[in-house]
Amino acid sequence: MSRLDSFIRRVSAQRDILNYVTGEISDVDGPVLELGLGNGRTYDHLRENLPLREIFVFDRSINANPQSVADGDYMILGEIRDTLAFCGPRVKAEAALIHCDLGSGDPTTDLATCAWISPLIIERTAQGGIVASGLALDLPNFEELSLPEGIQKKRYFLYRKL
Ligand SMILES: C[S@@+](CC[C@H](N)C(=O)[O-])C[C@H]1O[C@@H](n2cnc3c(N)ncnc32)[C@H](O)[C@@H]1O
């Protein structure tokens, strides 16, 4: 498969998954955490889907379309390893949804990311909350959910905190 085909499948899977999880968190209180602003596409989609939720966005720097950057207190800049660990005073409540889009394409880097980010995600997710991730995570007290129909296995991972 060409990289273009792979990109198209990845972003269309992201859109379908974000649409799916929007419905799954309707009974769970708490903000949304977007880990990895990047171009801001998925952030923009989340804020369109969830206009009444607080959405906190994390990245080490801003390289997004200017229309897709979170305002003031909702844009948390720095290494996620530090900012997610210490975001409590700003974010306050545990998250109803965490979308983690930090895949690097390098299997060693991705395994290292999984090792440090999984405990931080466990700590920041509300009971019943959903984690949607491009990387497989190690979340022992979560159930792994099936992906919406049509999305290839292991393209994305969905978890719910028990
Ligand atoms: C794949 S992009 C996210 C794409 C985004 N979801 C979109 O739709 O445009 C990943 C982003 O995560 C950020 N990132 C990756 N690892 C990070 C880390 N350890 N700390 C902070 N930011 C990180 C990168 O700077 C990059 O902007």
Image (cartoon, rainbow, N blue to C red):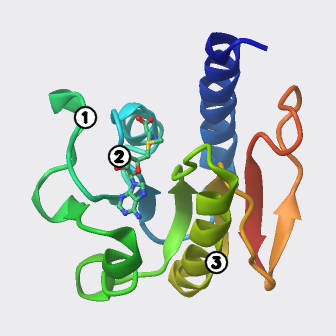
Name which residue type carries label 3.
Ala
The part of the image, by quadrant, that contains residue 99 is bottom right
Q: Name the residue under label 2.
A: 37
Q: Name the residue under label 3.
A: 115
Going by the image, does 34 lie left or right of 86? right
Where 19 falls versus 145 (above or below)?
A: above
- For label 1, count other residues whose C-alpha is less than 10 Å away and answer few (under 14), some (14-19) or many (20+): few
For the C terminus, the quadrant is: bottom right
Amino acid tagged 1: Ala
Amino acid at circle 2: Leu
Left or right, 127 with respect to 33, comes to: right
**Residue extending furthest toward the left:** 72
The x, y position of residue 59, in whole percent, is 31, 56
Q: Which of marks 1 and 2 is nearer the N terminus?
A: 2
For the residue pair 64 and 110, the one nearer the viewer reads as: 110
SS of the residue under disc 3:
helix
Q: Is residue 25 visible to us here?
A: no
* Element assignment for label 1: loop
- Residue 97, image x, y percentages: 55, 62
**What residue is disc 1 on?**
64
